[in-house]
């Protein structure tokens, strides 16, 4: 069965997250986006875990669905078939090797009993009710010990693996290998999340990751941003089916995985940590420029935040230069979110009423956001909205856009149309 999955999001109980991130809204927004399987996010939070148990009911093995009485109608005036998988992001801050480590992890659980066991163990370490993404003074290897002892079928995936401050390979607080981070449990770490500021091709350069799968998720804090990165499977619709599809994806002699079709990606330049820089001084630069300055901000003379391109280059195999390709790997497709394209076409902010009006028209006519972005003929998009929006989608598909790279916590800025284009 072919479907899209976004396995890493946050609930209303996480900091800096929309209060609309509730199960009822996630259920219908996923359908409008074209996503079948959503991570629940935040299952360690007591109040959210209570809602999960009260509002969801079992579906396929390891998956859940919203109870029928709670369902809200989608843009298409139908009810969603969305499935949920138990997931949470854990932030571990600890000292190892004379350095403070800050590593974020995605945990996937096959059932409520396993999630409950993990919650009990982690509750002895820190206050789980303080944040949907708990911050714990716990070594990553010890976290793995707790998770895998709760259930050997549970999964740990390093989250946004290259983010400077909070990831397994982060330039400011990470490690140079999975072995350093997870020790005796490294063999059970079969995937990493590439994050918004990197794409799979950047990760292909790192030979140490040849046996590791690359997944992509939105890490969304709002309904509008779910699915901005996601995974496309042709697999059994179940927890086991999804996990086995991910495990099947690393490059092998038998060729590309048939169960893990592709990942849906940001253009990595749009991510918040793609390039190097210092936000306080408005300084942004490429790794080549940073190296010339020995990573020091030319304005304030403090060390700049070293971004993902630089860090990947540090760990990459010398024989795998930028642009290295691996045909046996799961392919990927770079997309810009539909509201951003509409906003660009109309020359307004993506959160405006005029953008939502066109968004609704397109979903009603063509089925889902992913249908518009990936599959619908340009002529049909124009008929359902207008020629400028159709032109925007076409340019995005062809990669005909410019992006001012993100750096030091600032998202990159995507431009599809220039002033001259709009006059035309």
Image: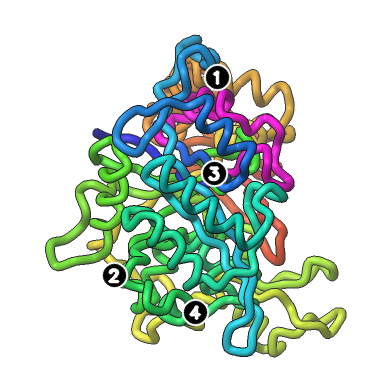
Residue under label 4: 313
User: How much space separates mark 3 and mark 1, taking CA atoms?
Assistant: 39 Å
Question: Label 3 belongs to which residue?
Answer: 43
Report x, y in % for residue 2: 28, 35
Eye-nearest disc, 3 or 1: 3
Q: Which residue is mark 2?
A: 211
Please state, as top left, top right, bottom left or bottom right, where the C terminus lies in the image: top right
Residue 340, visible in the rendered structure = no
Report the residue at 56% width, 62% height from top.
104
* Residue at the farthest right position: 300
- Percent across and percent down for residue 131 are 69, 49
Q: Is residue 417 left or right of residue 194?
A: right
User: Counting residues from the N terminus, which is met first, the one under dot 1 or under dot 2?
Assistant: 2
| Local secondary structure at mark 2 | loop
Location of residue 47 by image quarter: top right
Q: CA distance from mark 1 to mark 2?
A: 44 Å
Choose mark 2 or mark 4, whichever is in front. 2
The answer to whether 44 is drawn above or below residue 406 in the figure is above
Q: Earlier in the sequence, mark 4 or mark 1?
A: 4
Residue 121 appears at what percent x and percent y?
53, 57
Is residue 305 or residue 389 the one in the foreground? 305
How far apart marks 4 and 1 lie (CA) works out to 43 Å
């Amino acid at each position: 069965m072919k479907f899209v999955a976004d396995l890493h999001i946050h609930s209303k109980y996480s900091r800096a997250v929309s209060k609309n991130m509730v199960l009822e809204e996630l259920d219908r927004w996923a359908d409008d986006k074209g996503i079948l399987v959503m991570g629940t996010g935040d299952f360690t939070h007591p109040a959210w875990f209570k809602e999960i148990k009260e509002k969801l009911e079992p579906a396929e093995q390891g998956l859940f669905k919203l109870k029928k009485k709670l369902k809200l109608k989608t843009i298409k005036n139908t009810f969603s078939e969305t499935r949920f998988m138990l997931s949470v992001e854990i932030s571990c801050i600890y000292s190892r090797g004379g350095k403070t480590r800050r590593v974020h992890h995605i945990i996937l659980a096959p059932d409520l009993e396993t999630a409950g066991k993990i919650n009990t163990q982690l509750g002895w370490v820190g206050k789980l009710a303080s944040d949907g993404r708990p911050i714990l003074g716990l070594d990553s290897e010890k976290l793995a010990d707790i998770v895998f002892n709760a259930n050997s079928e549970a999964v740990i995936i390093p989250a946004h693996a290259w983010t400077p401050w909070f990831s397994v390979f982060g330039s400011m607080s990470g490690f140079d290998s999975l072995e350093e981070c997870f020790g005796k449990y490294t063999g059970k770490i079969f995937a990493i999340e590439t994050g918004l500021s990197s794409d799979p091709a950047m990760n292909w350069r790192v030979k140490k990751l040849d046996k590791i799968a690359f997944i992509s998720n939105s890490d969304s804090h709002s309904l509008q941003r779910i699915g901005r990165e996601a995974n496309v499977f042709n697999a059994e619709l179940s927890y086991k089916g999804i996990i086995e599809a991910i495990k099947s994806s690393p490059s092998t002699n038998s060729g590309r995985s048939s169960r893990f079709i592709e990942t849906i990606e940001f253009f990595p330049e749009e991510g918040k940590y793609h390039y190097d820089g210092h936000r306080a001084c408005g300084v942004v630069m490429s790794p080549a420029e940073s190296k010339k300055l020995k990573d020091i901000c030319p304005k304030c003379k403090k060390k700049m935040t070293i971004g993902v391109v630089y860090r990947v280059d540090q760990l990459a195999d010398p024989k795998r230069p930028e642009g290295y390709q691996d045909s046996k790997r799961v392919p990927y497709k770079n997309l810009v979110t539909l509201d951003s394209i509409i906003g660009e076409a109309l020359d307004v902010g993506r959160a405006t009423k005029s953008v939502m009006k066109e968004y609704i028209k397109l979903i009603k006519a063509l089925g889902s956001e992913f249908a518009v972005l990936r599959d619908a003929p340009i002529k049909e998009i124009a008929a359902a909205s207008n020629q400028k929006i159709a032109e925007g989608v076409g340019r995005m598909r062809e990669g005909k856009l410019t992006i001012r790279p993100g750096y030091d916590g600032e998202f990159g800025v995507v431009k599809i149309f220039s002033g001259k284009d709009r006059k035309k």
